[in-house]
Image (spheres, helix red, strand yellow):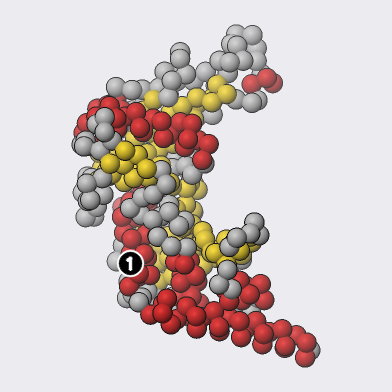
C-alpha cells in the first residue's frame, strides 16, 4: 500500500482524455468515500496517518482531496487518495467469531495525483505500479470518477505524456553517465547504480545491481550487443536549478520510483514536504528534461551509439586478453 508518506514508492503514469475540471473531480471524489459496510472502494484526500492501513474491519477518517496550486510553474494538481478493501490471507489465524472470514478484509490505499497535461488531456500519477492492484481497484475507480463528469472520457493505461518513447534512452543514459555525465550546466547524472537488461526475443535477462563498472566483462558484453534492451534504471541525479538531489528508478513509460532517504532539497522549506515536491519535480521537470536531452542529441543514433558499442566490445576483448596474459 505505497503512498506519499512511504520511504520508498513507485509511480505509474496514466493518460486520460476528459472534459472536466479539477474542482469537479474533487467534488465527485468527496461524494464517493470508502464504505466499510459494503467494502466499497472510495476516495479521500492526503493523510499522514497510516496506522489504520492494513487493518481489517476498518474505516478511515477520510479527508478531502486537495488542489495543490502554484508550485514552481507546474500545473495545478489534485492530490487524492483511493481506499479499497482486500481479503486478508492472515485472517484465518485470528478470526474470533465476531466477524465472518469474508468480513476480514484489510484496508489499503494509494495516492493519486491528477494534473492537466497542456494538450487537452490529464496526466494521472498513481503511487503503485502493481498490475493486479491497478487493474482490480485503481483503473475502475478512475474510470468511474472521470466518466461521471464526462461520459466520453477515455483512460489509457499503457501510455502517458511522460513516456520516454524508446528503451534506447537507457543505453544513452549509461553512455552519458560513463563519459559525459553533465547533461547541462544545471543537470548532472551522478551515477547509474542499477540497470535491468533483457536480450531481445528471449526470456534471458539480468540486473546490474552494483553500478556500471566499465571493467566488467558482462557489462561490456551487454552494452556492446545490439540485442540488449536496457531499462528500467536506478540513478542519482543532481539538478542545481531545482536545488534537488534525487535517487530514483526510471521506467520506459515515464514512471518512477523514489528513494526518499537519498533525496533532498537545498531549501529546507521544500524538504518539509519532500515526497510530494519530488513527485511533482520528477513528473513535470526531471523526466521531461531527461527525455529532451536524449532526443536533442541528434548524432547519438547516427554516430555515437555505434561508436559506444564498438568501444565497449574492444574493452571486453582487451580485458579478456589481459586475463589470458596473466
Q: Which residue is drawn at 62% across and 15% down?
A: 101
Q: In this view, does 57 lie above or below 197?
A: above
Relative to 305, say whether 168 is above or below: above
Q: Residue 197 at x, y = what percent?
A: 58, 63
- Would residue 210 be found to the left or right of residue 275 on screen? right
Please tell me which residue lies in front, 118 or 261. Answer: 118
Residue farthest along the front direction in this orientation: 201
**Residue under label 1:** 292
**Percent of width and height locating residue 129:** 48, 44
Tell me: residue 27, above or below residue 243.
above
Viewer-proximal residue among 157 and 240: 157
Residue 163 visible here: yes
Q: How many residues crowd mark 1 within 10 Å: few (<14), some (14–19), many (20+)?
A: few
Q: In which quarter of the image is the C terminus?
A: bottom right
The number of numbered badges drawn on the structure is: 1
> Residue 22: percent from the left, percent from the top?
23, 37
Q: Look at 31% across and 62% down and name the residue there.
A: 242
Say which of 83 and 120 sits in front: 120
Q: Position of residue 145 (x, y in %)?
A: 31, 29
Task: Tell me the residue at 43%/62% (across/down).
Answer: 166
Asked whether residue 243 appears in the rendered view, the answer is no
**Element under label 1?**
helix
**Residue farthest to the top?**
98
Residue at image point 26% right, 29% down: 151
Residue 115 picture quarter: top left
Amino acid at each position: 500500500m505505497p503512498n506519499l508518506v512511504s520511504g520508498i514508492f513507485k509511480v505509474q503514469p496514466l493518460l486520460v482524455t476528459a472534459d472536466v475540471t479539477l474542482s469537479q473531480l474533487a467534488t465527485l471524489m468527496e461524494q464517493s468515500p470508502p464504505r466499510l459496510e459494503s467494502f466499497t472502494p472510495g476516495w479521500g484526500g492526503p493523510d499522514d496517518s497510516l496506522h489504520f492501513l492494513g487493518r481489517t474491519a476498518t474505516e478511515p477518517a477520510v479527508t478531502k482531496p486537495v488542489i495543490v496550486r502554484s508550485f514552481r510553474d507546474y500545473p495545478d494538481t489534485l492530490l487524492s487518495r483511493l481506499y479499497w478493501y482486500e481479503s486478508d490471507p492472515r485472517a484465518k489465524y485470528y478470526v474470533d467469531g465476531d466477524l465472518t472470514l469474508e468480513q476480514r478484509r484489510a484496508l489499503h490505499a494509494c495516492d493519486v495525483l491528477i494534473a492537466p497535461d497542456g494538450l487537452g488531456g490529464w496526466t494521472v500519477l498513481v503511487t503503485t505500479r502493481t498490475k493486479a492492484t491497478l487493474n482490480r481497484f485503481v483503473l475502475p475507480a478512475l474510470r468511474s470518477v472521470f466518466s461521471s463528469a464526462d461520459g466520453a472520457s477515455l483512460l489509457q493505461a499503457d501510455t502517458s505524456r511522460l513516456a520516454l518513447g524508446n528503451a534506447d534512452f537507457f543505453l544513452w543514459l549509461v553512455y552519458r553517465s560513463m563519459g559525459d555525465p553533465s547533461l547541462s550546466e544545471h543537470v548532472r547524472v551522478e551515477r547509474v547504480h542499477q540497470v535491468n537488461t533483457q536480450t531481445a526475443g528471449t526470456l534471458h535477462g539480468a540486473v546490474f545491481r552494483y553500478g556500471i563498472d566499465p571493467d566488467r566483462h558482462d557489462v561490456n558484453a551487454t552494452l556492446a550487443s545490439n540485442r540488449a534492451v536496457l531499462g528500467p534504471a536506478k540513478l542519482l541525479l543532481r539538478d542545481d536549478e531545482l536545488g534537488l538531489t534525487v535517487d530514483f528508478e526510471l521506467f520506459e513509460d515515464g514512471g518512477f520510483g523514489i528513494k526518499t532517504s537519498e533525496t533532498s532539497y537545498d531549501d529546507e522549506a521544500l524538504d518539509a514536504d519532500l515526497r510530494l515536491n519530488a513527485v511533482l519535480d520528477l513528473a513535470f521537470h526531471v523526466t521531461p528534461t531527461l527525455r529532451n536531452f536524449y532526443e536533442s542529441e541528434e548524432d547519438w543514433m547516427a554516430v555515437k551509439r555505434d561508436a559506444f558499442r564498438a568501444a565497449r566490445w574492444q574493452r571486453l576483448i582487451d580485458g579478456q586478453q589481459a586475463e589470458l596474459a596473466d
